[in-house]
Image (cartoon, grey):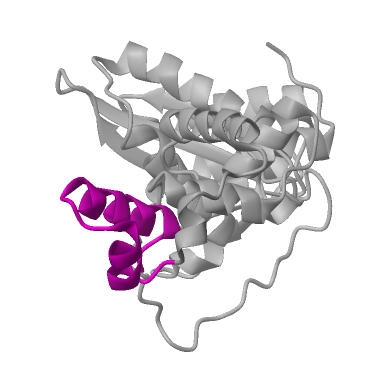
Amino acid sequence: MVRPDQKRAAVRMMQAHNVSQRRACQEIGVSRSSMVYKPRQPFKDEVLAESVKALSEKYPRFGYRRIGVMLGWEMNETINAKRIYRLWTMLNLQLPKKRPRRRRPGTDPIKLQSGHINHVWSYDFVSDRAANGQKLKILVVVDEYTRECLALEVAASIRTHHLIDTLSRLMTLYGRPKFIRSDNGPEFTAKAVIQWLTDNDIGPAFIKPGSPWQNAYVESFNGKFRDECLNREWFYNRKEAAVIIEKWRNHYNHERPHSSLDKQPPAKVSGRKYVA
């Protein structure tokens, strides 16, 4: 679909080649009055368009709705989503469409639903590699109720004692979960981990083998993490990766609007106290 501003530009181009305005408007299909129309608030839209463009460059995987929410926070006012969409299309800022994931038919529902803060945590691993060839194994811990990312622990490998130490530290900072959900990976099913969970009155909630959709919250987070951080950033080594990933985690918790939380960042909704 050709936008009105593009049609007007085509008319002006024809005029530059000695075609009358009347003839050009007839050929392109626009009214002559539109050629002299001046927007009522061009400067205001120009300033907003620059802000939209700047934020979209900073967060290229965000859509117009999330960008509009963040601009509203900055300007301390509510900005109409249709207005943002109009500027978004004018600036050609459409995101490339993702291929829909194929889902297996007849999947089992997640029986354990989180009902309050620290009710159910979920954890998983994400792998990547730094530019110098170092492997990155990242432990992801998410509170399913608040959607907060409680940890993104970066290491070459994460063994049982490292996993237990991380969970112990998170409990000291944020409190004890009632349950913790995971797949059946060897790190999560290790006897020492199960014993530690039992000793701390935490119920392990294992999903069925080959059923990652039953760990939907952490899987959804992993997709955002890879799309907005791992696929965008360049890590020279593991140490630099840990710093950049932790910075992104803080952005996710404190600044990024979450669609499931009425466009609020997770930390604002939970009211959880964070320790620097």
Residue 188 visible here? no
Q: Residue at x 15, y 50 (%)?
A: 17
Percent position of residue 100, x then y: 37, 70
Q: Residue at x 79, y 32 (%)?
A: 175
- Nearest the viewer among 172 and 26 is 26
- Nearest the viewer among 86 and 143 is 86
Dividing the image into 4 quarters, which one contains the N terminus?
A: bottom left
Q: Quadrant of residue 82?
A: bottom right
- Nearest the viewer among 47 and 23 is 23
Q: Quadrant of residue 167?
A: top right
Classify 164 as above or below 120: above
Dividing the image into 4 quarters, which one contains the C terminus?
A: top right
- Nearest the viewer among 63 and 214 is 63
| 21 sits to left or right of 161 | left
| 196 sits to left or right of 188 | right
- Considering the whole magenta stretch, tell me its main secondary structure: helix
Residue 201 visible here? yes
Percent position of residue 11, x then y: 30, 56
Classify 208 as above or below 268: below
Q: Magenta span covers which residues?
A: 1-30
Classify 235 as above or below 17: above
Q: Residue at x 73, y 14 (%)?
A: 275
| 132 sits to left or right of 251 | left
Percent position of residue 73, x then y: 73, 31
Check if residue 28 falls in the magenta segment.
Answer: yes
Total labels drawn: 0
